[in-house]
Image (spheres, rainbow, N blue to C red):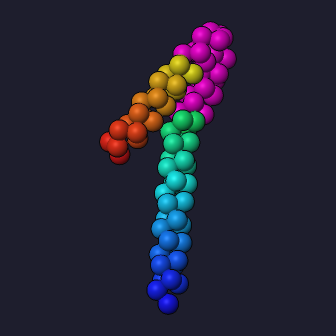
């Protein structure tokens, strides 16, 4: 009987570890892509409006990348 209980504990622990890994992957993914998905279209819009193509888009991509790196670094340090 204790074998079944031990097996259930291991299965529960594995399930919890899988859930944590999936949550971490999802959390990292949004931190990597959301800044760029917001800023690059804004840069494209501003380039078309102000006739500065491609400079505002490039600057938006660089700023989006910098924000992404900052967000992921904060996550890895455990600041959040």
Residue 28, image x, y percentages: 51, 42
Kindly tell me whether residue 18 is visible in this rendering: yes
* Residue 80 placement, left or right of 8: left
Q: Residue at x 46, y 29 (%)?
A: 69
Residue 54 to residue 23: above or below: above
Q: Residue at x 52, y 25 (%)?
A: 65
Tell me which segment is drawn in magenta.
35-60
Q: Residue at x 50, y 90 (%)?
A: 1
Instruction: Name the chief secondary structure element in magenta.
Output: helix
Task: Choose top left, top right, bottom left or bottom right for residue 37.
Answer: top right
Residue 19, image x, y percentages: 52, 61
Residue 51 to residue 44: above or below: above
Question: Closest to the observer: 77 or 64?
Answer: 77
Residue 55, image x, y percentages: 60, 10
Is residue 31 highlighted in magenta? no
Residue 77, image x, y percentages: 35, 38
Question: Closest to the observer: 33 or 72?
Answer: 72
Residue 12 to residue 50: above or below: below
Is residue 42 highlighted in magenta? yes
Q: Residue at x 34, y 43 (%)?
A: 78
Question: Closest to the observer: 1 or 73?
Answer: 1
Kindly tell me whether residue 38 is visible in this rendering: no
């Amino acid at each position: 009987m204790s074998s079944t209980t031990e097996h259930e504990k291991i299965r529960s622990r594995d399930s919890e570890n899988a859930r944590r890994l999936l949550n971490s992957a999802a959390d990292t993914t949004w931190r990597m892509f959301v800044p760029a998905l917001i800023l690059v279209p804004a840069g494209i819009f501003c380039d078309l409006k102000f006739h500065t193509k491609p400079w505002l888009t490039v600057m938006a991509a660089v700023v989006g990348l910098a924000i992404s790196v900052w967000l992921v670094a904060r996550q890895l340090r455990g600041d959040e």
